[in-house]
Image (cartoon, rainbow, N blue to C red):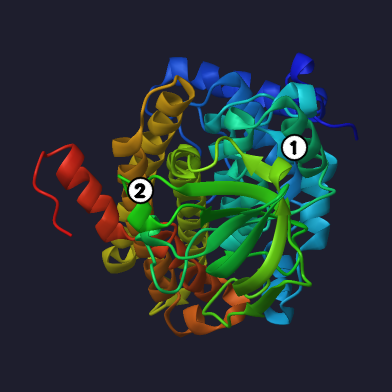
Amino acid sequence: MALVEASRGLIAARKNLELFSASSRHLQKLVRRNHRQFHGRAREYLPALPDLSESQSEVRAAISKICSKFPDDYWLDIDNTKKWPSAFTDAIAKDGWLGICMPSAYGGADLGLGEATVMMQTIAESGGGMTATSSIHMNIFGLSPVVKYGNEEQQKRMLVPLIQGKERACFGVTEPNTGLDTLKLQSFAVKDGDDYVLKGQKMWTSTAQRAEKILILVRTTPLEKVTKSSQGLSLFYTNLDREHVQMTEIPKMGRAAIDTNSLFFDGWKVPKRDLIGEEGGGFKLIMHGMNAERILLAGEAIGLGFAAVRRAAHYAAERRVFGRAIGQNQGIQHPLAESWIQLEAARLMTMQAARMYDDGFATGEYANAVKYLAGEAAYTACERAVLAHGGMGYAKEYHVERYLREVMIPRIAPVSQEMCLNYIGERVLGLPKSY
C-alpha cells in the first residue's frame, strides 16, 4: 500500500473504514438518545472513543485493524524468544503510519500529536504493550527537531527513508555519569575540517542493535567556556558507525525483544552536514521533542493500563470460586473499577495536552502532569490485574505479568516521576527549586 498522503488524509485508513463509520454514526445516535451510554465497555477489544475527532477516530479504527492481526500470543512469543517484532513493524510501515506526524512533502500524513497519541495508545492497548510501541516509538516522535529546525536538504535526506521504514533510528542523550542532568553530559565533538570527531558514551539507547541512524546530543564547547550550561551542546542525526561505536546490550526486566544498550565511541567522524541547526544550539532543539515524547508515552501507558483492566475484567467475570464469579466480589470489582476511572481521567487529560501542543501552546506543565498521571494509573491497573488473577497472574500464559513488567517503563522513563513533580512545583506552584 502506498504511503499516507496528506491530500487524502490517511489513504489506507479512509478507504477501509466503512464499517467503522457506520458503527461510529450509530454510537453518535446512541449518545444523543442516552447520554449515560456513550463509552464502550472496558471488556471490549479497542472500543471506539466518542470524544475523539474524526481523524483521530479513523486512526484508532485503522490501527485497531492492523493490531487485530497480532494477538497477545504473538507478543508472548516475541517476549519469550526475544525476537524483534518484524511482522508488526513491517505492517505499520507498509501502511505509512511511521509518517503520521511528518510533513506530507516527504511522504508523511501531516497529522498532529493528538492522532499520534491515539495511535500509540491503541497499539499498547491491543496487548502489544511497551514492546510494540517501543519498536516504532523513535520513528514517530524522534525526528521532530529535524522537522522543525533541519534545512530542506536534511529533511528530504533524513525523513523520507524513516517514513518509508527503510531506516530505523535510535536516540543518544543519557549518559552513565550524568543521568537526568543533561546539561552536564560529557560526550564531546571536536571540529575537524568538514567533520566532527565524537568521543564519549551513552546509556539506555534503545533499538541501537537494529538502527541505521542515531539522533545524538554531544558537547561541542566545554562547559567551563560557556556563560550558560545550556549552551555549547550540538545535535546530530547521522549514521550509526559500528566501526567506531561499540554497543553492549543491557539485560533488563521487561520488553526483552527491544534491545537497550550502552554505547562507547571514539574517533567517530560525523560530517558537518549532519549537524541539525546551529552548533551549540542543540539543547533547545532536543527540548522541542521532549514534551511531545512525554505526551506520547502517556498515551502508551494508558493503553497498557486499559489492556490490563480488560484482561482482568474478563477473568473476573469467568473465574468461579465458592459458586460465584470472583468479579461479583467488591474486593475484586472495585479496584478494577477505580483503575478504569483513573485511566480514563488520565486519557482525557493526555488528549487535552496533545491538543494544546498541536495548537502551539507551551505544554510543559501538561506534558509532565500527564506523564506522571498515566504512569501511576497504568502501574496500578497492571498490578491489580495480576492480583485479580490470583496465582494465575504470575503465569505467562495469562499475559498480565508481562504487562506489569513493562509498565515500569513509563514510571521511570523518559524522566522520573519525581522530576515531573519538580517541574510542577517550580513552574506551576512557584516554589523554590528543590534539587
Circle 2 packing at 10 Å, graded few (<14), some (14-19), many (20+), is few
Reply above or below: 366 against 68: above
Quarter of the image for residue 83 reads bottom right
Q: Residue at x 12, y 39 (%)?
A: 429
**Element class at badge 2:** loop
Q: Residue at x 44, y 38 (%)?
A: 284
Image side of residue 165 versus residue 372, left or right:
right
Furthest toward the left, the residue is 431
Q: Residue at x 77, y 43 (%)?
A: 162
Label 1 to label 2: alpha-carbon separation: 32 Å
In this view, the residue in front, 28 or 9, is 9
Residue 17 location in percent, x, y? 75, 27
**Element class at badge 1:** helix
Furthest toward the front, the residue is 193
Image side of residue 14 versus residue 181, left or right:
right
Q: Give the mark nearer the N terminus: 1 vs 2.
A: 1
Quarter placement of the N terminus: top right
**Circle 1: residue type:** Leu
Q: Residue at x 82, y 24 (%)?
A: 15
Q: Nearer the viewer, mark 1 or mark 2?
A: 2
Residue 204 location in percent, x, y? 53, 69
Asked whether residue 18 appears in the rendered view, the answer is: no
Residue 115 location in percent, x, y? 58, 31
**Circle 2: residue type:** Val
Q: Which residue is mark 2?
A: 226
Circle 1 packing at 10 Å, graded few (<14), some (14-19), many (20+), is many
Task: Determine which of the numbered discs, if any, sits on residue 159 in the image.
Answer: 1
In this view, the residue in front, 117 or 70, is 117
